[in-house]
Image (cartoon, grey):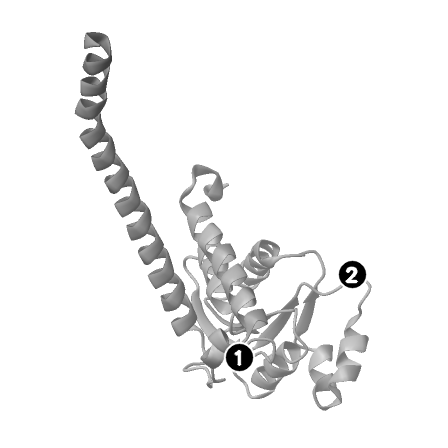
Amino acid sequence: MHAVGSGTGADAGTSPPRRRVGRIVLFVLGLAFVLFAADYLRFVYLIEVNENTPPRNADGIVVLTGGPFRIGDALDLLAAGRGRRLLISGVNPLTRSREIASLVPEHQRWFNCCVDLEHSSTNTIGNALETRRWVEGRKFKSLIVVTANFHMPRAMVELAHQLPDVTLVPYAVVSDKAKVETWWENSETARLLFLEYLKYILARVRMVLPSAAA
């Protein structure tokens, strides 16, 4: 009887500290969730919902392929004198300039003088690396970046990492795939934005890792 009573007392003595640790863990997890949700909402809020004219001209223009309207918008900027030369980054290796030019007949003449195609990159990191080579080869100091509005935050992070001394001017193409202003009403849009947010976070984390410098 005495042995049983002694064991019960020991358990009772250790229970309050365990409860305190449990409450601390729950508090930390709850705080982390709130901060994560707040950062996600900030990310969505910063995505452009309108296509706005770039506030300034630049030496060059780069368009990251992946949407049907991005190249057309980038060529419009080139034709308007917003940049001296255009890089189309991430083009399928089998695609040639004449094939792209045929899709935008009003801009065909620009392909003869001022448009470069880049076939090597297959993702945003590759786009940034190849854009850096293109920019450095031409000694450009400013660049208009054309990509989808939901992709712009991650593209800017990657490009700024590769081109810290180059002024980057975003031109966000509003995508039919993502109705950002009412994202919570469409599960596909919500999923797209959340996945893009996770990629954006991973890109930011990668920038502070020692291997990122390489």
Q: Amino acid at mark 2?
A: Pro
147 shown above or below 137:
below
Q: CA distance from mark 2 to mark 1?
A: 31 Å
205 shown above or below 65:
above
Q: Amino acid at mark 1?
A: Lys
Q: Residues within 10 Å of mark 2 (few under 14, many from 20)?
A: few
Side of 118 where 96 appears, left or right: right
Q: Secondary structure beneath disc 2?
A: loop
**Whole-percent x and y of residue 97?**
77, 73
**Whole-percent x and y of residue 53?**
47, 86
Q: Viewer-proximal residue, 8 or 168?
A: 8
Give the mark nearer the N terminus: 2 vs 1.
2
Which quarter of the figure is the N terminus placed in?
top left
Q: Residues within 10 Å of mark 1 (few under 14, many from 20)?
A: some
Residue at screen point 41% across, 59% down? 165
* Residue indicated by mark 2: 93
Side of 86 where 9 appears, left or right: left
17 shown above or below 132:
above
Give the number of the disc on residue 179.
1
Side of 116 where 96 appears, left or right: right
Residue 151 seen anywhere in this rendered image of the structure: no
Q: Secondary structure beneath disc 1?
A: loop
- Nearest-to-viewer mark from 2 and 1: 1
Total marks placed: 2
Residue at screen point 65% across, 74% down? 67
Residue at screen point 43% across, 52% down? 204
**Whole-percent x and y of residue 24?**
24, 40
**Whole-percent x and y of residue 81?**
54, 85
Q: Viewer-proximal residue, 35 or 42?
A: 35
